[in-house]
Amino acid sequence: MNRMWRPAAGRRRPHRGGAASCGRRLVAALCCSAFAPSFAAVADEGTPPEATAAAETAPAGSSGIGWGVDGFGAAALLTLAPQTAFYQGVGGEGGIDARVELLPWLGIEAVAQYVGFGGNAGGKSGGAFLPAGGLRFDPLTKLTWGTVYLSAHAGYALTGPLGRFGFDAAVGVEWWIGLLRLGPMLRFIDVTSQANATEIGGDARIFFVGFSIGLGPDRTPPPEVRVETREVVKEKIVERVVRVEAPSPTVGALKGRVLDLDEQPLQAKLTITPEAGGEAKQLDAFPAYDTRLPPGEYHLEASAPGYLVRGRDVTLKAGETVLFDFTLRPVPKVQTAVLTPTQIEIKQTIQFAFNKAELLKASSYILDEVTDILLHHRDLRIRIEGHTDDVGGAAYNLELSQQRVDAVRSYLVGAGIRGDRLEVRGYGSSRPISSNATEAGRARNRRVQFKIISSAPGGGT
């Protein structure tokens, strides 16, 4: 490029700052503040006090090495001649920086950016690539929404075959949204002049107003903890006993999703009812649900328009997170389960593996309809009756029928029906409804029925 200006070298996103002397003063101040607590501790122990007891509040703050990566853009404003005579006063910049946080309030940074300006009066445009490095200072480490920061960098502005040293100082605000970091920044940069500059001499001084967006770890301070200290003097040796009391959690977390058979989130509602009594709570469960509740037992019901209701009973402990996804089945066009005055009548047969009490997948469609009826009619109590044909011994068939109704009961309890609403009884081959002389008759005799035994208002789920 012809007539390339020699703009600023160092550059950091919205948060960098300081000229060379400012940077040296910043490092000196940080070092002094870092060593001050150690000097105080030595002075305290040099003069052992009498036995005392005290309570302190330990400051919250993150520990360990952090990180950050940011992209930024800004409007650039030239302030000095001769650059303003050759280039338009307003230009632009963009770049990226990476940071390692050695302490919650101090980090080191590497920056790469490009700054450009258009030419005046038919002149050619100019620009510079600016690699730099420096420090970032976050003085307000206890903020929960983000941070206010200062930064300083030194770098080298590359403008074609020439290059010049530069310094910058910046101040900015950064909001935290999970891993996301974003906010505005103000920055000033000074690129020094060169005696051998052949095109445009003099310092280049530019102001920047811009915005950055990036990623970084969650630095939200943890809750404060209570620290109790006690000093005991024994033969001029001071013993320091520290006991940390962290606050005990008082609630548990309940999280999950309500999905269709293709595992896609549904526009669903989740109703939460305390088993110990109390008001039910309804949540919007799209695309997921996430709530905090006191410890206890709860009945959950997931519902969506056009889908069968599904339930679940959970026990929540303080400090514990329960994760559960509901899968809802569409309401069938032709129902296979119908409520009558005496029973929940099913129009198809509950199917099991041959000679076993293992439910086949096809049976879940029928049992989900039975579940939906029971969740909509909480006053019903039923008896699940199991029957077999006469193939095999009577004792064996009686035991098999009992195991099969136990499997049906377990399915319904898992779907949110309280166990005390469900009785089970296996009859074996003692109550046929058709002749066992034919295969069709034996198939009719192998059945599960849902008989109503009471319908008291106000029953549970």
Image (tube, helix red, strand yellow):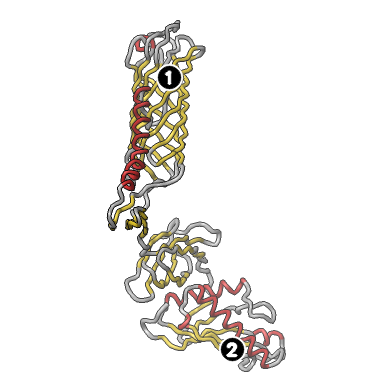
Secondary structure under the numbered disc 1 in the rendered image = strand
Residue ID at (33%, 52%):
58
Which x, y percent locates residue 277? 34, 76
Q: How many dots with numbers? A: 2
Q: Which residue is mark 2?
A: 426
Relative side of 202 to 264, left or right = left
Q: Which of marks 2 and 1 precedes in the sequence?
A: 1
Q: Is residue 229 visible?
A: no
Residue ID at (53%, 85%):
384
Residue nearest the viewer, comparing 242 with 104: 242
Amino acid tagged 2: Gly
Relative side of 71 to 223, left or right = right
Q: Residues within 10 Å of mark 2 (few under 14, many from 20)?
A: many
Which x, y percent locates residue 422? 49, 83
Q: Is residue 31 above or below residue 205?
A: below
**Quadrant of the rendered image containing residue 174:** top left
Quadrant of image for the C terminus: bottom left
Relative side of 192 to 161, left or right = left
Q: Do the numbered discs 1 and 2 sit on residues whose CB atoms are within 8 Å?
A: no
Q: Residue 116 has which mark?
A: 1
Which x, y percent locates residue 438? 71, 88
Q: Nearer the observer, disc 1 or disc 2?
A: 1
Secondary structure under the numbered disc 2 in the rendered image = strand
Amino acid tagged 1: Gly
Which x, y percent locates residue 17? 36, 28
Q: Is residue 317 visible?
A: yes
For marks 1 and 2, give the CA distance.
85 Å
